[in-house]
């Protein structure tokens, strides 16, 4: 659905913004993004 896509995009953007700051791995894993 469009809602799911929007939520997924928002989650990906939040994870991307978190990564340069060296956020805790737990936060990245809980959002399903493994980098």
Image (cartoon, grey):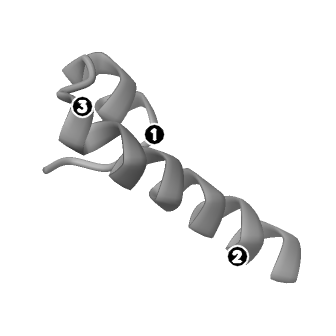
Q: Nearer the viewer, mark 2 or mark 3?
A: 3
Which residue is found at the position 24% from the left and 31% from the top?
21
Which quadrant of the view contains residue 10? bottom right
Between 22 and 26, the one lying in front of the other is 22
Location of mark 1 (residue): 31
Q: Looking at the image, do the residues carrying marks 2 and 3 touch, with CB atoms under 8 Å apart?
A: no
**Residue of label 2:** 5
User: Which mark is in front, 1 or 3?
Assistant: 3
Lateral position of residue 19 relative to residue 8, left or right: left
Give the alpha-carbon distance from disc 2 to disc 3, as whole Å. 25 Å
Indicate the quadrant where residue 30 lies: top left
Mark 2 in CB contact with mark 1 (< 8 angstroms):
no
Figure check: 23 above or below 31: above
Could you tell me which residue is drawn at 45 percent across and 39 percent down? 31
Sequence-earlier tag: 2 or 1: 2
Report, in whole angstroms, how far the alpha carbon at label 2 lies from the one at label 1. 14 Å
Examine the rendered structure and indicate whether residue 22 appears above or below residue 16: above
Dividing the picture into quadrants, the one containing residue 27 is: top left
Seen from this angle, which residue lies furthest front?
A: 21
């Amino acid at each position: 659905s469009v809602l799911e896509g929007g939520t997924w995009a928002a989650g990906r953007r939040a994870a991307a913004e978190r990564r340069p700051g060296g956020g805790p791995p737990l936060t990245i894993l809980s959002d399903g993004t493994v980098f």
